[in-house]
Amino acid sequence: MQEKKIILLASDCESSRWVYHALKEAAGIEAVILEQPVSKKELAKNRIKKTGFVPVMGQVLFSALVVPLLKLQSQKRKTYLVSKYGLNSSAINSSKIYRVNSVNDEGSLKAIQLLQPDIIVVNGTRIISKKILQSTNAIFVNMHVGITPYYRGSHGGYWALRNKDAGNFGTTIHLIDAGIDTGAVIKQVFIKPDKPDNFATYPVLQASVGIDALKEVLTNMEAGNYKTIKNSEKGNMYYQPTLWQYLTGGVR
């Protein structure tokens, strides 16, 4: 059986390094296409168009006033999770990297066409355009830290807890289509956060179990042995909470 060529299409962030090192050992990663992070200004402008000025200002206040404190409080917990799950934050081998401004620009398109992958693993990027999706016969696979279709978008673990829906705290491995976290589901894993966890560590916990699930999925895909479940419901789209949503939500 011929091995599948796998590449990683990702944002330049810590969780992408976790995914790369885990998959490098388990499945092999031919190359990494890294996009530059979206600027805070661009992100705010896009969010304002979707949700309005007031919610975005509430998100900005939450990020500025609360998130730094939560990260400080949870440093020991994050260190524990990183060690427990063997997450590797070291730099990706530079010889493997193709740097692009966006996953949707010409540089990304050319890299994909040059590499001719069979499977493209996606982590933390902008929404991938139809042009990119249709430019290759490769299968696009995403690790989403949330249970779809109920918790699409951002911070699915936090919103599940806030909605008193702890049974849907987890991670989804799914195919990518033209929607946002709407592709067919391959595998979902559910986990219960512990008391020391908070908004800053929920994604770490979800990514930890999600990476193990992703390794299993890729092994099955290489063997041609995987099934998908179509997302039959639209579900809800979530973003980062506003300051007032967090303070009144009853969830750390």
Image (cartoon, rainbow, N blue to C red):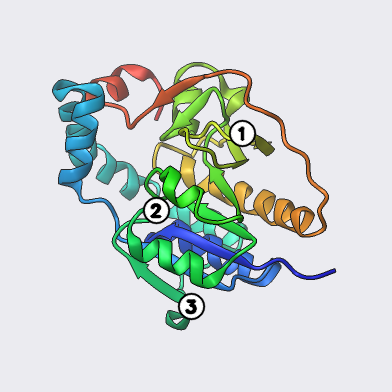
Q: Tell me which residue sits at (59%, 39%) in the image.
A: 171
**Horizontally, is 38 left or right of 97 in the view?**
left
* Corner quadrant of residue 110: bottom left
Q: Amino acid at mark 2?
A: Gln
Q: Tell me which residue sits at (35%, 66%) in the image.
A: 107
Q: Is residue 188 visible to the viewer in this orientation of the structure?
A: no
Q: CA distance from mark 2 to mark 3?
A: 30 Å
Pointer 2 with pointer 1, Cβ within 8 A? no
Across and down, in percent, residue 251 comes to 41, 25
Q: CA distance from mark 1 to mark 3?
A: 36 Å
Residue holding disc 2: 75
Q: How many marks?
A: 3
Whichever of callouts 2 and 3 sits on the residue coming sooner in the sequence is 2
Q: Count neighbours of disc 3 (C-alpha within 10 A) and say few if under 14, some if 14 to 19, many if 20 or more.
A: some
Q: Which mark is residue 192?
A: 1
Q: Count neighbours of disc 1 (C-alpha within 10 A) and say few if under 14, some if 14 to 19, many if 20 or more.
A: some
Across and down, in percent, residue 49 comes to 20, 27
Residue holding disc 3: 96
Pointer 1 with pointer 3, Cβ within 8 A? no
Q: Amino acid at mark 1?
A: Lys
Up/down of 192 relative to 5, above or below: above
- Element carrying mark 3: helix
Question: Which quadrant is home to the C terminus?
Answer: top left
Which is closer to the viewer, label 2 or label 1? Answer: 1
Q: Amino acid at mark 3?
A: Lys
Q: Which mark is residue 133?
A: none
Across and down, in percent, residue 237 comes to 42, 24
Q: CA distance from mark 2 to mark 1?
A: 19 Å
Pointer 2 with pointer 3, Cβ within 8 A? no
Up/down of 61 relative to 201, above or below: above
Q: Tell me which residue sits at (70%, 67%) in the image.
A: 26
